[in-house]
Image: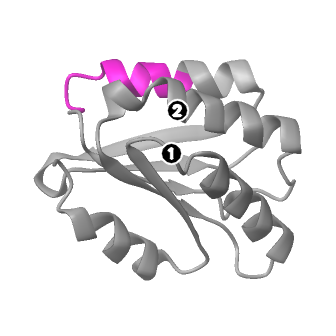
Amino acid sequence: MPLTYQIHPHRSLVVVTRRDRVGAETWEAFLTALLLDPAYAKGFAILEDRRGLRELPTRVEVERASGWIQEHGAELGATRWAILVSETSPAAFGMARVREALTSTGPVEVRAFTDYEAALRWTEGLGGAV
């Protein structure tokens, strides 16, 4: 599966794993299904693990993903969304930072990481639901 998620209600956390590149429509449908999952609650933090991706997202894809986050801010709630990329890909980190910048005005705080434990600590910094 190119996209999976695991909800950890006791941690108010969702870990999304992206293994392969998917189109914007597939990504948005996946996220919409996540929001509809009965185990998901507004305010859960999201850790998006993109370390398995070999291809970089395009600027258009980053802008569209940022737009989706902004458009669904009310459903996501005030929370944190960590984007985890491979430490061997500075370009992937740069594109994640672009998404971080494009979502800087909404209730979802986005940040790029190359270290899983650091990303996890940061997402838990809010305690999940706020």
Q: What residue is shown at x 86% (from left), y 44% (from top)?
A: 59
Quarter of image, res 109: bottom left
The kind of residue tagged 2 is: Gln
Image height check: is 42 above or below 78?
above
Q: Is residue 33 magenta?
A: yes
Say left or right for 49 vs 78: right
Residue 97 visible from this viewpoint = yes
Callout 2: SS:
helix
Residue type marked 1: Thr
- Residue 32 place in picture, x, y as percent: 46, 20
Q: Please name the residue that numbered disc 2 is placed on.
A: 70
As drawn, 74 above or below 52: above
Q: Residue at x 70, y 73 (%)?
A: 86
Q: Which residue is mark 1?
A: 105
Quarter of the picture containing the N terminus is: top right
Which residues, given as a range, are shown in magenta? 30-40
